Amino acid sequence: MRAPSVRATSALATSLFATLLVLAAMLLFAALPYLTTSNYIIGIAISACIFTVAAASLNLVYGFAGLLSFAQLGFWGIGGYAAALTVMTFGGNFWQGLVCAGLVNVAVAVAIGYPALRTGRHAFVIVTLAFSLLIALVARDWVSLTRGPLGIPGLPTPGLFGFEFNTTPRFYWIAFGYAVTALGFLYALSTSRIGRTLIAIKQNEPLVRAQGISPMPYKLAAFAAGAALTGIAGGIYAFHLKLIDPLFLDFYFMQTFLIMVIVGGAGSFWGVVIAGIVMSALPEVLRFSADLRMILYGVVLLAAMLAMPNGVAGWLHERSLARARAALR
Amino acid sequence: MSVPCKFERSILITLALSIIILHVAQYLFTANPRIVDTQYGFEGVTIGAIRITWTRVIGAAAALAAFGMLYVLLKHTQFGRAMRAIAQSRDAALMVGIRPKRVARNAVVLATALCGLAGAALAPIQLVTPGMGQYLIFKAFALVIIGGLGNVPGTIAAAIGLGLMESFIGGFFEIVWQEAAVFIVMIAVLFLRPEGLFKRGAMRVG
């Protein structure tokens, strides 16, 4: 009878260790502006925070609910434009812009998601891809609203109660605060009953139906939550760049999110978060030109799909399973 | 963690291939637009009040010829019969000795060739850039959904109908509606008939 209690203690120690590790990583990220004065490094950290949230949202939709959605790119663009237009055209402030980005995206996600989810998985992928391309076209051609290819330059620095987020380290607090909030929400969601239901839907939808659970509300909720989080991330990123133009909807962003999810491991929360941080920093460290980076991303995506379809997290999981099996034998 | 379904895997692999091809082309030839400059772009035929350049006439002729050959191929050759057989019943096709993998590979080769033909026919009409296909793909996808996945005549009907509708909207409304129209029609079709406008036995290989 001793073995189980030992195992329970060691499991407790592991989870305690993991919690401490996460807290230490959070502290390290929070202290970043005090560790370095380089705006370049903090700029990369801002991108890392924002991209990781977008990748984790895609993970909720693809990794958990099993819906390969290319619409994240469209939501990213809608969020960016909604936040920018709220401030520049409709006279709101930055925070109202973010709220607007989230709400508009939820509305659009429900309007697109409901008809798209009624069809098969094949049609869903195509509809979401067409949606993102449409948003790019609208951003370019609806000149009276989005100012077309010229874009909207000179987005103002956000402020709160008289405090101006006017330097890169100060803006970092916004990105970091949002990343912690959004990732915390996604973690709570993916470890809750809803997260388990989503995985069940991905693995065996007929069985879920047989258990008396209607998959549609779960899928739609995951789609809408992913859209809102991606949209707000897009809004923050637009204000980080201080400019938004149709290039904000370049396929480069979708590809970045996808690579983070695929390499990290679709369906693994921490795998995608770590991949998001690493994949944001790595291209900067290796200093590729933009063209070469895209080619390399394509090669990485191809290699990951052929060699490790479940990403690094899936590969580690399989290895530990294999070791457990070997130990049993 | 389950192995991702074959379909998602193939989508992501083809996406990766497309990104690689597009950006290698951009790396080698730069993103600057180029013009295919021929006499056919200036001269044309005049029918009543309308003048059509030869490039467009040739493009339309190429499309008609390609459709005709595709029809003959699907209906009257052993290769086309094998493809339709697999679409109808994979198991039965296996039983009479058709190899699905091989037929699917041939289908991909055929589709790639047709896509290349479309790009070549379009090159003298538009500017040529590495990303010239991106916005066309958007329309192609929408048309396939409207016509019904795997329904060739349905897709042709949808293509002609939407082309006319687009030109009509482009003449009377802001340009943004011209782009949005295709998508709005697609969403409406999905709402009313999730199987596509022209429901019939779907034909898809692989």
Image: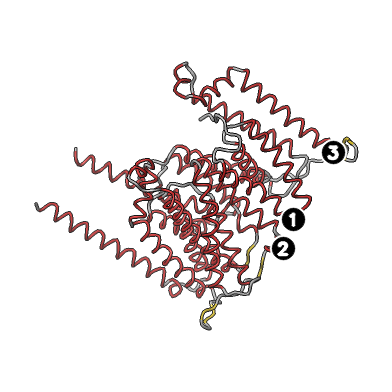
**Residue in the picture at 62% in, 54% down:** A135
How busy is the neighbourhood of tag 3: few (under 14 within 10 Å), some, or many (20 plus)?
A: some
Say which amino acid is labelled 1: Glu
Disc 2 target residue: A144
Say which amino acid is labelled 3: Ile
Q: Is residue B49 left or right of residue B198?
A: right
Q: Which of the image's four quarters has the C terminus of chain A?
A: top left
Query: Circle 2 marks a residue in which chain?
Result: A
Circle 3/circle 1 CB separation < 8 Å: no
* Disc number placed over residue B52 in the picture, else none: 3
Mark 3 / mark 1, whichever is N-terminal = 3
Q: Are marks 3 and 1 on the same chain?
A: yes
Task: Tell me the quarter of the picture where residue B130 sits.
Answer: top right
Disc 1 target residue: B174
Please, what secondary structure does the residue beneath circle 3 have?
strand
Circle 2/circle 1 CB separation < 8 Å: yes
Residue A36 drawn above or below residue B195: below
